[in-house]
Image (spheres, rainbow, N blue to C red):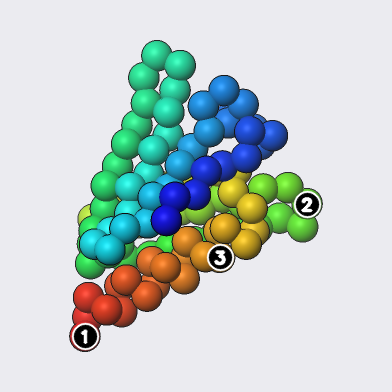
Amino acid sequence: MKYTASRLSEGNKLFPAQIIVENTGITIKIPGFFSGDETSVAYDSISAVEIDTPLIGFSTIRFYHNGNKVEAHGFSKSDAKEIKNAIENGRSKGRS
C-alpha cells in the first residue's frame, strides 16, 4: 500500500513524502529539489512508531529503528493510523 502526504502540508508542496507498506517492511521517501532521502526498514528492526495528530492539520509519523529516527509529515489522521496498524501487524507476524 502506498501513502502520499498532502501537498497542502508544510514541506510537501512540490515533492510530497511517501510511505510504502510492503510485506517485509516499509519504505519512506522524502524527496527534495536537488536530493532526496529514501529509507527501507524491515518490520523486525522497527522498535517504535509514534504519531502526532493535531486537532487541526496533518499528522507526523516517526519510526525508530536501530537507534535511528525517520520522520514524515503531512499525512491524514486516518492514513497515519492505517500505517501504524500495518507496521504493528507486520511486527507481530515477525515475532510469531
Q: Which residue is mark 2?
A: 56
Residue shown at 33% from the left, 47% from the top: 27
On the question of residue 65 being in view, the answer is no
Horizontal side of residue 89 vs 58, given as left or right: left
Label 2 near label 3: C-beta < 8 Å? no
- Give the CA separation, mark 3 to mark 2: 16 Å
Q: Secondary structure at mark 3?
A: helix
Location of residue 19 with respect to 84 vertically, above or below? above
Question: Which quadrant would residue 1 be assigned to in this image?
Answer: bottom left
Location of residue 90 with respect to 15 vertically, above or below? below
- Give the CA separation, mark 1 to mark 2: 38 Å
Q: Residue furthest right?
A: 56
Could you say where residue 21 lies in the image, as x and y percent from the top left? 37, 56
Location of residue 28 with respect to 47 vertically, above or below? above
Could you say where residue 85 lies in the image, as x and y percent from the top left? 46, 71
Q: Which residue is mark 3?
A: 81
Q: Secondary structure at mark 1?
A: loop
Amino acid under disc 1: Ser
Q: Point out the tag, 1 or 2, that comes first from the N-terminus.
A: 2
- Give the CA separation, mark 3 to mark 1: 23 Å
How crowded pointer 2 is (Cα within 10 Å; few <14, some 14-19, many 20+) is rated as few
Q: Point out the tag, 3 or 2, that comes first from the N-terminus.
A: 2
Q: Which residue is mark 1?
A: 96
Amino acid under disc 3: Lys
How crowded pointer 3 is (Cα within 10 Å; few <14, some 14-19, many 20+) is rated as some
Q: Residue furthest top?
A: 34
Horizontal side of residue 86 vs 10, given as left or right: left
Residue shown at 28% from the left, 63% from the top: 23
Q: Point out the tag, 3 or 1, that comes first from the N-terminus.
A: 3
